[in-house]
Image: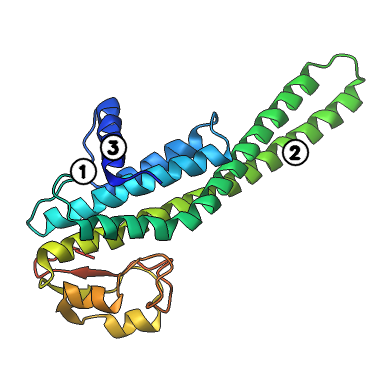
Amino acid sequence: MPDIDSAVSSLRTMAAVLDTDFFTAETRYADELRRVGEDKEKDEQQKRDAILLLLLLFAFLAYQEGVEDGGAEVDQDTLTIAQRTLINSFAVSQTEFAAGLAKAMAEQDKADEAVITANKKLSETVANTSQPADVKAEAIEQAKEEVKRAHEAAQSKQAIVERRITMWKNSLRTMRALGLAWAAGSMELTWFYGDTAHCRTCLWLNGQTHPLAWYLEHGYIPGQPGSPTLECGGWECKCGAYDNRGIRRL
């Protein structure tokens, strides 16, 4: 796995190539993961490697944005050993899930290729002039059905990839929260429901106000995929912890 300095260097190169600012780590992270998925030149292993690089890139960026949200500054030159260890530990903890996303992306590639093949077969069937009209008509209907099934399968695979990307995007909330905690751990936050079904943990937390550090100490991070402390696991959680100005901080 690359270290933070090389990852940040790659991030700067990426930003220059794309000619854009990385305003929100989570949003840019999701966009870059989609780019990996759409790259048909990469096989499953190459997609996994790209996912791991992006993971470290954006783990750092989310942490940095969290620090800035708390009114402080940090960059790769001023990171302490403890901060580097924190970011690397988070990235390592997520690596086991990279294979699952890469596999889902590779399966989507195969499904997309099946759509191309089905459409090609339909075109060839329509262009075929050697068959009797009734036989040809039946063959065309069969080919259309194959195209329909291929499209449905591809859409299903795409939906799976998108769900996984959303979970990866949400995982960065942990790093943003840790960065914010480093800069402003005493900030008071109130937990509020999101627009979804609620587990008993979120029901209990709703309306409670605590310092940011308290939420992190107890592991209460809304929307954290695979959360061991939220009964819902954080997978579909849309709750948030807000400061006294109504700004979501967690």
The disc labelled 2 sits on which kind of residue? Answer: Glu
Q: Which residue in the structure is indicated by mark 1? A: 23
Q: Which corner quadrant of the image does residue 172 belong to?
A: bottom left
Q: Residue furthest front?
A: 81
Residue 84, visible in the rendered structure: yes
**Is residue 183 positioned above or below 109 on the image?**
below
Q: Quadrant of residue 238?
A: bottom left
- Give the secondary structure at mark 2: helix
Q: CA distance from mark 2 to mark 3?
A: 45 Å
Q: Residues within 10 Å of mark 2 (few under 14, many from 20)?
A: some
Q: Is residue 163 visible?
A: no
What is the distance, in whole Å, between disc 1 and disc 3 at their CAs? 13 Å
* In this picture, residue 105 sits left or right of residue 184: right
Q: Amino acid at mark 1?
A: Phe
Q: Earlier in the sequence, mark 1 or mark 3?
A: 3
* Residue 111 image point, x, y percent: 64, 40
The amino acid sitting under disc 3 is Leu
Residue at the spot of label 2: 145
Q: Nearer the viewer, mark 2 or mark 3?
A: 3
Q: Eyeballing the image, is 100 above or below 249?
A: above
Q: Residue at x 8, y 55 (%)?
A: 72
Determine which residue is flagged by label 3.
Answer: 11
Looking at the image, residue 198 sits to the left or right of residue 126; the answer is left
User: Disc 1 and disc 2: Cα gap in Å?
Assistant: 45 Å
Residue reaching furthest to the left: 71
User: Of 89 and 197, which appears nearest the observer?
Assistant: 89
Q: Residues within 10 Å of mark 1 (few under 14, many from 20)?
A: few
Depth check, front residue: 203 or 81: 81
